[in-house]
Amino acid sequence: MYDQVQEVQEDTQYIILYSIVTAMNAVASVYLLLRRGNAFASDITPPVRLRRWTAAFFAVHGNDRNGVDAGSK
């Protein structure tokens, strides 16, 4: 009985952690698509292609589990 409770708690913690990381990736992706300047150095403007590639990377790898692409399942 105790083992089942412990497994559920570990699964819940994993799901919460995974959800937070996925949300952070989504926010980073949207930020990069909408923001023109640099958050740390306002006088530097990264190229649009770099921001789009990086946003796509965050969007794709935000759904990645343990190094395996989610679309290949």
Image: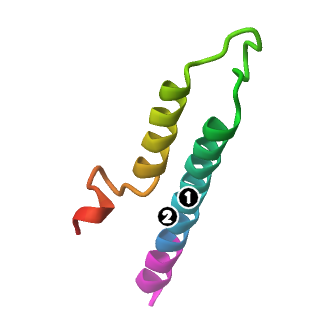
Q: On the picture, is 4 further left or further right than 30? A: left
- Structural crowding at the residue carrying mark 1, measured as other residues with C-alpha within 10 Å and reported as few (<14), some (14–19) or many (≥20): few
Task: Give the labeled residue for mark 2.
Answer: 14
Q: Residue furthest right?
A: 42
Q: In the picture shown, does residue 46 fall above or below 35?
A: above
Q: Residue furthest front?
A: 48
Q: In the picture shown, does residue 64 fall above or below 35?
A: below
Task: Give the labeled residue for mark 1.
Answer: 17
Q: Residue at x 55, y 58 (%)?
A: 17
Q: In the picture shown, does residue 60 fall above or below 46?
A: below
Amino acid under disc 1:
Leu
User: Could you tell me residue 49's position as x and y percent?
Assistant: 48, 27
Q: Residue at x 77, y 14 (%)?
A: 42
User: Could you tell me residue 72's position as x and y percent?
Assistant: 22, 63
User: Could you tell me residue 66's position as x and y percent?
Assistant: 32, 53
The reply to whether discs 2 and 1 touch (Cβ–Cβ < 8 Å) is: yes
Overall secondary structure of the magenta section: helix
Amino acid under disc 2:
Tyr
Q: On the picture, is 16 further left or further right than 71? A: right
| Magenta part of the chain | 1-9
Q: Residue at x 32, y 62 (%)?
A: 70
Instruction: Identify the secondary structure beneath mark 1.
Output: helix
Q: In the drawing, what numbered circle is on residue 53?
A: none
